[in-house]
Structures are given as C-alpha cells and as structure tokens.
Amino acid sequence: PALAPALAPALAPALAVGEAFAIEQPMSLCEEGGSEILLEAVQACDVDVASLPLHLRSCCWAPDRSPHAFGRHEQPEMLKALVPDDNLRNYVSRFHFELVYQAPTWYIRKLTYNILTVGGAFAPQSELYPLSDGAAIGFCGPQGMQPFLTLQVRISGPRDAAPAGAP
C-alpha cells in the first residue's frame, strides 16, 4: 500500500521507544479520505528504525478495503528491513494479524499462534480487539513478552476511533 508523500513531514521527528504521541491536527495518512490507519515501527531489535525510509518502517490503509492483512506474505520488504535476522523474522507469521474497520472503530484480529501484544496485553486469538490511536502492537519471539518489534498505531480521520482507554 502506498503512502501519501505529504505524510513524510508529519512523521519526521522519530519517536523514542514506547513514546506516545498525539495528533494535534487532522491529517491524511493515505491517499484516500476517511478513517485511515497507519502502523509505524518504533522499535526493532538491532535496527535503528529512525534511519529507515518511511516505506520500510510504516504501512497505511484506508477503511474501504478492510480487512487488511499484516505479515511476512503481505509486507516482505518492510519486515526484512525491520527484522534482518531470518530466525527472528520467522516469529512473524505469513498472515500474523488483520486490521478490520467497522465504523467508527478499527480492530485487530490475531491470526497466528505466535505471541502478539496490544498495549502490553496478550491479543486474543481470532477475536476482534479494538485499537486506539497510539496503541503499541508487539511481536514477541524467544524472549516471551519482550517484543522484538513494536508498531505504533496512528488513526486519522473521524475522531470517533476507539475510546482513549482502549489499548
């Protein structure tokens, strides 16, 4: 999925690991309008995420084509850049999770038996779990609950996304 060139300035300052952010103004993440969702890597084991080009550390979707799969099959170049170790990258399934938009909320559905966290808690298997702006999605491997890759969720568009208390 292509990212709008206008997004690059909005993401210019790199986030520290686990640092939350706030969207101060409405922004368009994707080329289409609506309640878009962006996943941006904010932490990866042995990789300086901030040094990677935007297209290798983030991906963006619009709600009209939901559901959207994430995994080694769908984002191979991005995951090779973020997780260069083949053995560790195998902890990311070919179809690890999918993002589902049911107005007005974005949800994540875990499709793998590998450990996935949302907001630091285990993501339930095969159930829709609401996402909120700023939530962290963690991919865990041999270290259990310690993520080797963390993606941060950014939701733009209608501000009626999941409540702030949701992960």
Image: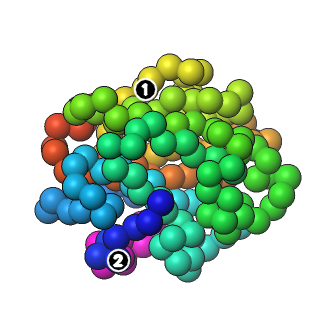
Residue type for callout 1: Tyr
Q: Residue at horizontal 43%, vertical 26%? A: 129
Q: Quadrant of the C terminus?
A: top left
Q: Which residues are magenta?
A: 8-18
| Rendered image quadrant of residue 158 | top left
Q: Which element is circle 2 on?
A: loop
Residue 12 vertical placement versus 30 (above, below)? below
Q: Left or right: where does residue 27 sit relative to residue 14?
A: left
> Does the magenta run of residues contain 116?
no
Q: Quadrant of residue 93?
A: top right
Q: Which residue is mark 1?
A: 129
What secondary structure is the stretch in magenta mostly built from? Answer: loop
Query: How many residues crowd mark 2 within 10 Å: few (<14), some (14–19), many (20+)?
Result: few
Q: Is residue 62 left or right of residue 164?
A: right
Q: How many marks?
A: 2
Residue in the picture at 56% in, 76% down: 52
Q: Which residue is labeled 2 in the image?
A: 5
Residue furthest to the front in view is: 65
**Spatial separation of the CA atoms under disc 2 and disc 1:** 30 Å
Q: Which numbered disc, 2 or 1, marks the residue closer to the eye?
A: 2
The spot of residue 50 in percent (x, y) is: 52, 74
Q: Earlier in the sequence, mark 2 or mark 1?
A: 2
At x 48% / y 73%, what residue is drawn? Answer: 54
- Where disc 1 sits, the SS reads strand
Percent position of residue 8, x then y? 36, 76
Circle 1: is it few (<14), some (14-19), or many (20+) Cα within 10 Å? some
Rendered location of residue 110, percent (x, y) = 57, 30
Can residue 125 be seen in this snapshot? yes
Using the image as rendered, state which of residue 26 and residue 146 is in the foreground: 26
